[in-house]
Image (cartoon, rainbow, N blue to C red):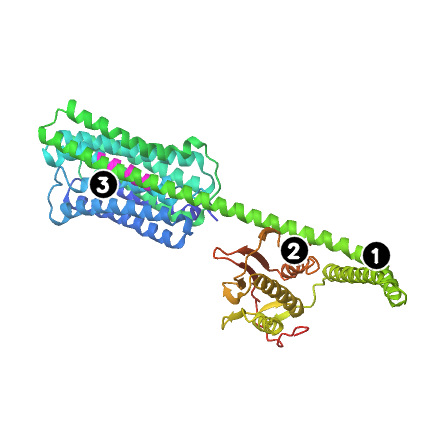
Amino acid sequence: MTLFRRHRWFFAAAAVTLAFAIVSLLVHKSPQLTAFADITGLAVMSAGIAVGVANSIRRPASERSFWILISLGFSLWASNQAAWSYHEIVIRKAIPDPYFFDIILFFHSVPFIAAIAWRPDIDKKKVKLHLSLINFLMLLGWWSFLYAFFVFPPQYIVADIGQYNIYYDRLYGLENALLLIVLGLAVFTSSGGWRRLYFHFFAAGIVYGINSQFLDRAAAAETYYSGSSYDIALIATLSWMVATTLSVTEWNLQSVELSLHPLWKKLVPQLAMLTVLTLPLLGLWAIAYDQSPGLSREFRLFVVLAAMLFLGACVFLRQYLQDQSLIALLQESRRGYESQKSLQTELVQKEKLASLGSLVAGAAHEINHPLNAIMTQSELLWDKEGLTPDQHALLRKIVNQARRTRDLVTHLLSFAQQAPGEKTLIDLGILLHRATQLLESRRSNPKIRITLSVESDFPRVHGNANQLFQAFVEIIENALDALEDAGGGSLLVSAFRNRDQAVLHFSDTGLGIRQPERVFDPFYTTKPVGKGTGLGLSAVYGVIQEHQGQITCQNKPEGGALFILKFPVAAEPVPTQAAGAAGA
C-alpha cells in the first residue's frame, strides 16, 4: 500500500484545512466569508457525527459505547455551530453575549472525556458498569454544578458580561486541559492501533486548546469574526479528528488486558467522592468571600444545596449497589464452595468404588473355594444319622452362615465385575413403568402406594437398559423398605426435562436417611444384619456415573428421602427399538 493510500484521510483533512486557510487569508470580512466558514465547520462536524455512528454499528460491541460518546460530542459541537450559522447566515444578526448555546459548547467536551476514560482498548473481564456509570454521573453532575455556580449567575441572574467571560473562559480552558490529561494518560498506557488513535486526538486537542486561548482574547478585543484566521485551527482540529475516526478501519484496534496500579484504579471513585467534599467549601466561599450581588450569592447557595442532594443520592445509590455486589459475591463464593465440596465428594466416591472393585474381585474368588468346601462338608455331615439335637442345631447355624457368606460373595463379584455394556437410545419412562409394576406386585402392604409421573415430552437418553433397570429397582426397593419401617406411606417417582437434562425424582414419605452423605459408601447400611449388604446403592452410583449422569440423596424438610438422578439428553433423536430389561 502506498504512502498516500495508507494516509489518504489525513491528506484529505490537510487539503480541507489548506483550502479553508487560503479563503480565510485572501477574502476580507464579508457575509460570504461568514457563510463559507460556518457551513464548512458545520459540514465537518456533521461528517464526524456520521462516521461515529457508522463505527458504532460496524465496529465490535466492545467499542460501541466509545463511538456513541464520540458521536454525541460531535453532535453537541454541531448544535452550537448550527445556532451560530442560523444567527449569522439566516437572520444575519450578531451572536448575543452571553448566548444560550454557550452552554452546549461548554459541555461538548464531556462526552469526549467520557469516551477516552471508558478505555475500550482495555479488556474489561468483570467490569462493574453500574458503578462506573454512577461515578461518571457524579463527575458530570459536579461539572454541571461548577458551571451553574460560577458562570450562570453573571450570565442570567445578575448580568455581568465581564465576569461571565472570565468565569466561562477559565472553566472552558480547565475542561480542555482535563481532556488533554485524559488523552495523555491514554497514550501513555495504551498500545497498537489504540495508541495511534489516542495520539491523533491528543495532538488535535493541543491545537484546539491553544487556539481557544487566542480566540477568547480576540473575542474580548472584538477582533474575531467567522472566517478569520482563528478559525483555521478549528477546521484543522475538526478535520484531523474526522480523519482519525475514518482511518480506524485500517488500524488494528485490539483490546488487551492491562494491569494498572491500584492507585489508578481508585482514581475515578476517589475523584467522585472528592466532588462531594468540595461542595461545603464552595458554599462557605459564597457566604463569606463572594462579592457578587445578593441574588447571585443566594442562587449559588441554592445550587450548592441542589448539588449536595444529587451527589448525596448518588453516594447512597453507589453504596447500595456495592452492598448488592458484595452479597452476590458471597453467594457465588458459597455456590463455588458447595460445588467444589460436591465434586470432591464425587471424586472420593469414585476412588472408593474403583479401589474396592479391584480388591473384592480377587478376594471373592479366593473366598469361594474354602466356602464351597465348608458348605459341602457341612451338608454331608448333616445327612449322617446318629447326630444329637444339639449337633443338628450347630450344623444348621453353620450352613445358614455359609449360605449368607456365599450370597455376600455373589454380591461382591456382581459389584466388582460391572461392565459398561452396550448403550442405545432408550426411554427411561418405560423402564420406570416396568420397575414400579414389578415391585408393586411383590408388595402386600396396602398402606404403601407407588405413583409414577412422566412428562409427555420426556426425552430419551443413551444408556444400557438392563443396568439402568436394575438401578431403578434398587432405588425403589430401598424406598419401599423405608416405608415398611415407617408403617406405610407413598413413593412418588417423577420424570421431567430440565433444559438439556433428563431428571428423575424418587420421593418417599418414610423416616428419611440417618447419614445422606454416606448412603453411597460401600457396605454402609441401616438394615438389620442379614437383610442387606450395603452394596446396592454403591452399585447404583457406579451405574449412574458410567452413564455420565449424577445422583444425589437428601432428606426432605417435611420428612422422607429424595433421590435425584440427572442424565444428559441424547443429542440426536435416532429411532431405536423399545427398551427392554432383564427380568421385566
Q: Earlier in the sequence, mark 1 or mark 2?
A: 1
Q: CA distance from mark 1 to mark 2?
A: 25 Å
Identify which amino acid the numbered label 1 is placed on: Glu
Magenta region, main secondary structure:
helix
Identify which amino acid the numbered label 2 is placed on: Thr
Q: Residue 175 in the image: x percent, y percent? A: 28, 34
Residue 414: image quadrant is bottom right
Q: Report the mark closest to the observer, 3 or 2.
A: 2
Residue 143: image quadrant is top left
Q: Which mark is residue 105?
A: 3
Q: Mark 1 and 2 residues: CB-CB less than 8 Å, in contact?
A: no
Q: Report the mark closest to the observer, 3 or 1.
A: 1
Q: Quadrant of the C terminus?
A: bottom right
Q: Was residue 144 drawn as part of the magenta stretch in this picture?
A: yes
Read off the residue under disc 2.
525
Instruction: Identify the residue at image location x=59%, y=75%.
Output: 575
Crowding at label 1, few (<14), some or many (≥20) Cα neighbours within 10 Å? few
Read off the residue under disc 1.
366
Q: Which residues are magenta?
A: 134-145
